[in-house]
């Protein structure tokens, strides 16, 4: 197991032992296990500073491969003990789900920020991923893009995208839909818990296994500045939009540190 740098040996040993106990009881091959823990708030950044008693909140994350499938669990709590409790429960549930076969997750989910101070929980609304959330906070503050990612999007069905979103503990997942050859997202929202949106309007997927609703319109074409303004004014957790000119899909989302992250397909 790899534990993030910056934690004291005592805290790292406690955290590692808790997660190792969960993994040791799993009826599956667990590899590439990585644990990251850090503080929440503007004065500290998960993964880059140590957790200390009295911190305004703790963000804990574990990444692993279970029987060859990547999973991620991320939890926020008021203190280290509660964060590890949630992380252990979440990891146990995620490993069981991966090995037993995927089923749609219930909606709505319990809040991840229960018990956190208001300042710590405010930035914890849906974002697509851990790597972005665990970066150092930017002095730019809220309403500014502080992290950009340009991955090669995977071509897969909306069903497969929903399963990846759940396995990786994301709230929204950007991919390319082969049925329409357009960029698309699945995200967590009511009433079914899953929704599909594409950069261009199209019909529902054929015989989906996931109970998802469909956005009837294509994603709006927006500049980065327009997207930031729309997300901020509407107080949205994330925003799917199309890049003017190329039409490629992009996702703007809120990070735990209060800034914004942007995911755009590699051109």
Image: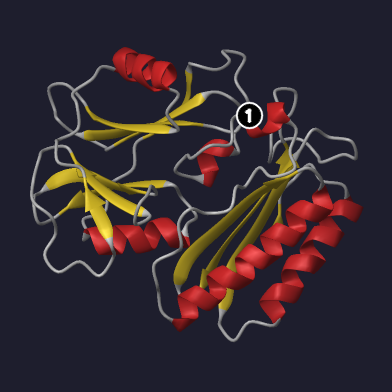
Please report the residue visible at 54 percent of the width from the left and 58 percent of the height from the top. 72
Which residue does the image show at 38% across and 18% down from the upper left? 228
- Is residue 1 in view from this perspective? no
- In the displayed structure, does residue 78 sit left or right of residue 254? right
Quarter residue 199 falls in: top left
Q: Secondary structure at mark 1?
A: loop
Residue 224 placed where, x, y %? 32, 18
Residue, disc 1: 136
Above or below: residue 37 compared with residue 199 = below
Q: Is residue 57 above or below residue 17?
A: above
The residue shown at (81%, 49%) is 80
Q: Which percent across, then down, holds residue 27?
A: 59, 86
User: Which quadrant of the rendered structure holds the N terminus?
Assistant: bottom right
Q: Position of residue 163 (x, y in %)?
A: 36, 63
Name the foreground residue: 130 vs 192: 192
Judge from the rendering whether residue 136 lies leftward or rightward of residue 56; answer left or right: left
Q: How many marks are shown on the rendered structure?
A: 1
Q: Is residue 81 above or below residue 245?
A: below
Name which residue lies at 11% across and 38% down. Answer: 200
Q: Is residue 140 visible?
A: yes
Q: Residues within 10 Å of mark 1 (few under 14, many from 20)?
A: some
Most foreground residue, 1 or 262: 262
> From the image, which quarter does the C terminus lie in?
top left
The extreme front residue here reads: 191
Name the colour scheme: secondary structure
Q: Position of residue 58 (x, y in %)?
A: 74, 42
Q: Residue furthest toward the bottom?
A: 27
Q: Which of 20/107 is in front?
A: 107
As drawn, 64 above or below 171: below
């Amino acid at each position: 197991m790899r534990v993030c740098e910056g934690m004291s040996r005592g805290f790292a040993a406690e955290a590692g032992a808790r997660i190792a106990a969960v993994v040791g009881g799993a009826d599956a091959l667990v590899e590439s296990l990585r644990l990251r823990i850090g503080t929440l708030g503007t004065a500290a950044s998960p993964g880059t500073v140590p957790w200390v008693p009295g911190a305004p909140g703790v963000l804990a994350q574990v990444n692993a491969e279970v029987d060859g499938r990547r999973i991620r669990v991320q939890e926020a709590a008021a203190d280290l003990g509660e964060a590890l409790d949630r992380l252990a429960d979440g990891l146990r549930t995620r490993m069981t789900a991966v090995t037993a076969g995927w089923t749609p997750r219930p909606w709505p989910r319990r809040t991840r920020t229960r018990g956190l101070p208001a300042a710590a929980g405010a930035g914890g609304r849906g974002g697509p991923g851990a790597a972005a959330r665990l970066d150092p906070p930017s002095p730019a503050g809220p309403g500014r893009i502080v992290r950009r990612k340009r991955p090669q999007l995977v071509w897969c069905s909306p069903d497969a995208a929903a399963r990846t979103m759940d396995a990786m503990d994301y709230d929204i997942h950007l991919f390319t839909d082969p049925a329409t050859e357009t960029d698309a997202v699945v995200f967590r929202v009511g009433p079914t818990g899953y929704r599909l949106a594409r950069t261009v309007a199209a019909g529902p997927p054929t015989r989906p296994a996931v109970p998802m609703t469909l956005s009837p319109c294509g994603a709006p074409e927006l500049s980065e500045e327009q997207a930031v303004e729309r997300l901020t004014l509407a107080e949205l957790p994330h925003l799917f939009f199309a890049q003017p000119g190329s039409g490629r899909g992009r996702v703007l989302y809120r990070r735990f540190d209060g800034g914004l992250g942007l995911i755009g397909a590699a051109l």
